[in-house]
Amino acid sequence: MFRPLRMLLLICAMVPGLASAQGAGVSFGGLKQDTTLPVEVKADSLAVNQADGSATFTGNVVVGQGDMRLSAAEVRVEYDPEGKAIRQLHATGGVTLASKTDAAEAREAVYTIDEGRVVMTGDVLLTQGKSAISGQKLVIDLKSGSGQMEGGVSTIFVPGGN
């Protein structure tokens, strides 16, 4: 469904010698995103909570914004106080974030729309072509196309590999 990355997620130049580093900067050209584009959500079911202004999508959830796709078992959507715009998405259960050229997987992700910021946590794997980088936390700035991997960072870099 999603092509392995060449990201960031997003979207990337992986630098040799990052293996075993505790934190690593990552370029995510393919996951750079226009956060002003509309967000579309598809799922098997939806539950709306009027009291706290949220909606929870469950089952085969796919969220799209431009060329970026986020899929997960469940996505909780929090709206702004006026209920006119999505403030934040909280995805859990087999989360995948992908663009046309990049992809990242994690246990959980929080996407803050206005900031254009995605925080992926729990066994994060980012692949770009034949190269891969893993860690416990990936913070992606979709507006600038940059990111930071933290927590037991390990990488396999294939020079010139797609």
Image (spheres, rainbow, N blue to C red):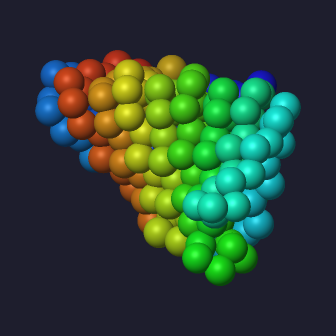
- Is residue 77 rendered to the left or right of residue 25? right
Answer yes or no: is residue 119 visible: yes
Which residue is found at the position 63% from the left and 61% from the top?
A: 51
- Res 100 quadrant in image: top right
Q: Residue at x 61, y 46 (%)?
A: 76
Judged left or right of residue 42, residue 128 is left
Q: Nearer the viewer, residue 139 or 73?
A: 73
| x and y percentages locating residue 144 in the rendered image | 45, 65
Q: Is residue 107 above or below residue 75?
A: above
Q: In which quarter of the view is residue 16 placed?
A: top left
Closer-to-camera residue (45/101): 45
As drawn, which residue projects farthest toward the front?
A: 51
| Residue lying at 19% horizontally and 39% vertically, measured from the top left | 23
Q: Can you give x and y, in whole percent of width and height, for residue 153 in the image?
A: 24, 27
| Above or below 1: residue 118 | below
Relative image position of residue 115 (x, y in whole percent)? 47, 69
